[in-house]
Image (cartoon, rainbow, N blue to C red):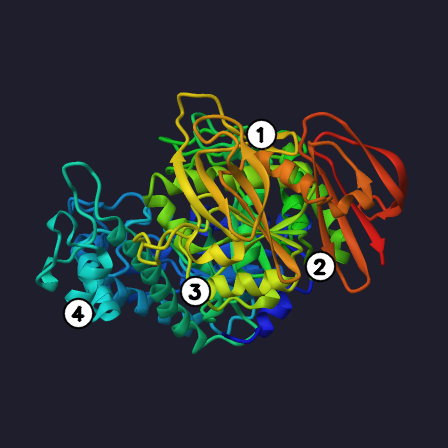
Amino acid sequence: MREQSEAKRKAGSKITMGVCYYPEHWDESMWEDDLRRMKEYGISVIRIAEFAWNKFESEEGSYTFDFFDRFLAVAAKWNMNVIMCTPTATPPAWMTTKYPEVLNADKEGHLYRHGMRRHANMNSKMYQHFTKIIVEKLAEHYADNPSIIGWQLDNEINCEMEVYYSESDHLAFRAYLKEKYQTLDKLNQAMGTVFWNQTYTDWDQVALAQKTNTGGTNPHMALEEKRFISETVISYFRLQADILRTYIKDSVFLTTNGLFNNIDYHRLIQEGILDFITYDNYPDFAYEVENPYRDKVLKDRNMTFNITRARSISSYFGIMEQQSGAGGWNFRMQQPMPKPGQMRLWALGAIALGADFVSFFRWRTCTFGTEIYWHGLNDYSNTPNRRLEELATIHEDIKMLQLTAGTKYIAQVGIITDYDNSWDGDIDLWHGPLRRNSVEGIVRALELGHITYDFINLTDETLHSELKKYPILFYPHATILTEARVKILEEYTADGGIIVFGSRSGYKLTNGQCTTLQMPGLLRNLCGVVVSDYTFASPDREMMQIDVNGRKLPALCFHDILRPETAAVLGTFDSDYYKGLPGFTVNYFGKGCAYYYGAGFAEETVAGILEELSIRPWAESYLVAGNDIQITMRKGDKERYLFVLNYGDKEQTIEVKGNYLEIISQKREAGEQKMEAYGVKCYQIME
C-alpha cells in the first residue's frame, strides 16, 4: 500500500470548490471571462481534457499541445488550479477507423462503432499501445506545469459499457484463467463444467459469455468474468499511473471518477494506483422520467448511498461532478431542473457526508452534441440565472464550513459489503434481489432513524481495528464466505461487537458453487444455529412476519427456518407450514453476540431490530428532527460538527437540545428552530 502522499495531505487541508470546463467547446475569446467569473464565485479548481484526445493527437503520431498550452496560460493568469485528465474515454476517429480492433463488442462479436463514448477495448494491445503514448506525451509536457495539481485517469470507466466481448477480451480472459488455474482440470472443477457437458478439453475453447438459446450462462464463469473485468480496469489504470508517477511530483495527486459496476475500487487505493477516489453526484436521477430504480422514499437523499460507498474506498474523497442543472441526453434521460435550494443542499450534503472537494458539472450548458440537455451552472445564453445566485451562496457557506475541513465522518453502524457477494448477486436471481432489497431496507431505516452508517468492504485481509470502531454491524446476506473472513467476524464479536446476519448466509464458496456444509455453513459456530429448512417467499401471498416479543417484523424474500444449537430464540414465523418455528435468534459469543434473522430486511424490520437491541441514534443527544431531516456528523480533535439537512420541500421544525453555534449563520441556537425547504445547518459542538 502506498503511503499517504503529500498530494493527499494537501488536498484534505481545506474544502475547495471546482467546476468541469471544456475549453474546446468555446471560442477562445470566452476563456478569460469564464475564468474571471469562476474566481468571483469562489471556484478555485477546474477539470479539463477528459474527451480531448484529438486536440493533442489530431492524426496518428502528430502531437501538438498549443491549444491547451494557451488555455493553461489563461488559467495561470487567474491563479486557477487544474485537474488534467488522460483522454482515453473517447478514442479519436482516425484510430477507430484504421484500427477497429481497439473497439469493444457485444456478446455476438458486433463492434461498437465510433460516435459515442466508452467504446474502446482496454484489452486491445493496439489500444494499450496508443494509451501508453498519449499518457507519456502528456506527462512529459505537463508534469512541471504549476497550475496542474492533479490528474484524473480516464473518465467514468465502465459507464455505458461494463462488459467486454471483443476478440482481444476473449484472449485476455483465457490468459487470465490460465494464470489463475494453471490447468484445465482445475478450471473445470472450479467452474463445475461437468454440469450440462460444458467440460473444456482445450484452452482455445474457453471464452467470455456468448449468446445462448436461453440467454443464461455458466454462473461460475459469469462470476469469474466480473473479476476479470475488474482486473482489466485495475491493470489499465496501473498502466497509466505508472507512467504518470515517473514524471509528476509527490504533491500532484492521481484520482478517477466513479462509481460503476464490475470494478474493485478499493484495490485502486490499497495498491497505490490512485491517491483517492472521486464520485460523480447526480441526485436528480431520483426524479428521472421512467427510472424504475429510483428510491421513492428517500428520493434525492438516496445520493447518500453512493457517497457512503465512495467514503469506504478512501477516507479523503471528493465530488468530481456535482449536478447543477437539469440532466438529459437528446435520446435518453429526462431530469427536471433542481428546485431553488436543491443545488446548495446537494453540494453541502456531500460535505456533510465527508467530502472536502465539490466540483460542479458543468460551467456552461453545451450548445451541441448528445448532452445539450445536461445543464450546467450557466445556460446557453451565458446570462445571470438563479443557479449562479445559489452558487454565490454556496461559496459563502463553504467559507464558514472551512472549520470542518479534514475532519472525519463518524458512523454509528457499519454495513458489511464485499465484491464477491455483490458480483454474485448480479448473476444469481435467488441471492441478488434478496441482497439488494435488504441493503435498501437497512439504509432507509438508518437514514430515517438518524443513525449514521458506513459501508465496510470485507476481505480476507480486513483488520480487526477496522470493524472494532462500530458497535453494531449488519452483514445482510453473507452468501459467499471464507474461513479468513469468518475468523475476522468472530474476533470482532468476541471482543464485544454486535453483528446481525440475514437469511441465505454461508452457503457458497468463492467460485459461486454451493458448499455441502449445512447452512449457515462457516457461520454455524458464530451464530449458534443450523438452518433446518428454507424456502423462497412466494409472491402470491401476503408478506410473512416474524413475531418478536409481540412485535411483527416483515420477513422479506427468503426464509430460513432455524434450529438453535447454542443460540436463544427471539422470534418465530407467524404463518405457513413453519408457523411457530424459530426465525430470529441471538448467540452470545465471547463479550459480544451474533444475531441471525431468517429473512430479508425491510425498513420496518431493521427499525424493529434496532429497537430490540436498544440502539438509539447518537444525534438524539443533540437534537430532535423529523423524517425529512438528515443528520450527519464529522469529528475533529476537540469538536463535533453536526450537519442538519432538510430534504423536504416544506419548512421543518427541529429541537436543539443545547446551545450551539450554527457556523453557517454564525448564530447560537437552542430550542425550536425553523429550517426552510432544502435548508442546511451545521452546529459546532465542543467536547
Name the residue nearer the viewer: 321 or 367.
321
Name the residue nearer the viewer: 273 or 392.
273
Q: In this view, does 472 lie above or below 547?
A: below
Horizontal side, residue 286 vs residue 54: left or right: right
Residue 82: image location, x then y, percent = 54, 61
Q: Residues within 10 Å of mark 2 (few under 14, many from 20)?
A: many
Q: Is mark 2 on a helix, strand or loop?
A: loop
Closest to the camera, between mark 3 and mark 4, is: 3
Closest to the camera, between mark 2 and mark 3, is: 3
Q: Any mark on residue 483, and which? A: 3
* CA gap, disc 1 and disc 3: 38 Å
Closest to the camera, between mark 4 and mark 2, is: 4
Q: What element carries label 1?
A: loop
* Residue on which disc 2 sits: 405
Indicate the amino acid at tag 4.
Answer: Thr
* Residue on which disc 1 sits: 297
Q: Residues within 10 Å of mark 1 (few under 14, many from 20)?
A: few
